[in-house]
Image (cartoon, rainbow, N blue to C red):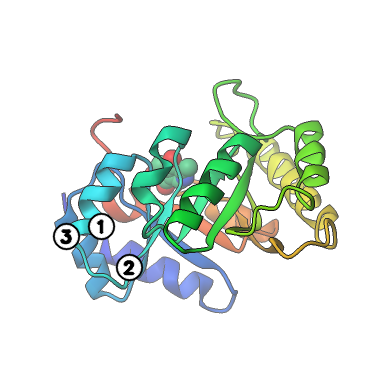
Amino acid sequence: MGINTQAYKAIRDEIAATNTTLVAVSKTKPAADIEALYHLGQRDFGENYVQELVDKQGTLPADIHWHFIGHLQSNKVKYIAPFVHLIHGVDSFKLLTEINKQALKNNRVIDCLLQIHIAKEETKFGFNEAELATAMADLPAAGLNNIVIKGFMGMASFTSDTAVITAEFTYLNNLYQHYQLAPNTDNYKPSILSMGMSSDYALAIAHGSNMIRVGSLLFGERNYTK
Ligand SMILES: *Cc1c(COP(=O)(O)O)cnc(C)c1O
């Protein structure tokens, strides 16, 4: 328990000259640790589990921007729709449609990122290139007026081979660049490329990321995963 203040300040200094947003990934960590980072000025926090996010949001300062970065099930969208700032892991058109529906119910517009499958592991989620092309083609006529797609998110393979990670980040950045101008529709405004975690955030920034999701470097190793 306890946050790594030194690492936090080092990352802030490192990204100060870039226009990179740091999302502090606080999953499984206590509210006290989030508060400690909040008092150092951090406002963007990322969570992976709906119930945990709802519990924390209810007790922590109202000006926190909560990012949902985990795998989101359609039937749970309603719990985070009233307050979520950005949903990173949108991996199907069905989920996008449900987010739109719940956003409408809450009289909100919810910002989303499409998760792209870039890793070797089959277990990771996300659109492949063909599915992405279909989703982009379907978007303009779908009438999803209560979501805005702000860009893409990806997770590199779990490996220490930087050549593999670099290739995956480059691939995602190229896709992101490819879809800068189209589809030309009100709910597609690409400005965010979310990639990079504790072990590879510097590499990610070097390859076009402008939003990094850093957990263990700030909060320490997680003892368990849910
Ligand atoms: C847990 C998680 C992170 C943070 O991982 P660290 O290696 O602890 O920095 C980033 N992104 C996603 C999607 C995660 O699930």
Q: Horizontal placement of 177 versus 188: left or right? A: right
Q: Is residue 193 left or right of residue 45?
A: right
Looking at the image, can residue 190 be seen? yes
Write down the residue under mark 2: 64
Q: Quadrant of residue 165?
A: top right
Q: Position of residue 32 (x, y in %)?
A: 14, 58
The quarter in which the C terminus is drawn is: top left
Q: State whether residue 90 is above or below residue 177.
A: above
- Assign ligand 1 to one image quadrant: top left
Q: Is mark 1 within 8 Å of ligand 1?
A: no
Q: Earlier in the sequence, mark 3 or mark 2?
A: 3
**Label 2 to label 1: alpha-carbon separation:** 8 Å
Taking the image as shown, residue 220 lies to the left or right of residue 210, namely left
Q: Circle 3 sits in a helix, a strand or a loop, which is it?
A: helix
- Mark 3 neighbour class, 10 Å CA radius: few under 14, some 14 to 19, many 20 or more: few
Q: Nearer the viewer, residue 193 or 138?
A: 138
Q: CA distance from mark 3 to mark 2?
A: 11 Å
Looking at the image, do the residues carrying marks 3 and 1 touch, with CB atoms under 8 Å apart?
A: yes
Vertically, is 222 above or below 214?
A: above
Where disc 1 sits, the SS reads: helix
Q: Are marks 2 and 1 in contact (CB under 8 Å)?
A: yes
Mark identifier at residue 59: 3
Residue at image location 37% in from the left, 50% down from the top: 80
Residue labelled with disc 1: 57
Q: CA distance from mark 3 to mark 1?
A: 6 Å
- In the picture provided, is 199 more to the left or to the right than 50? right
Q: Amino acid at mark 2?
A: Ile
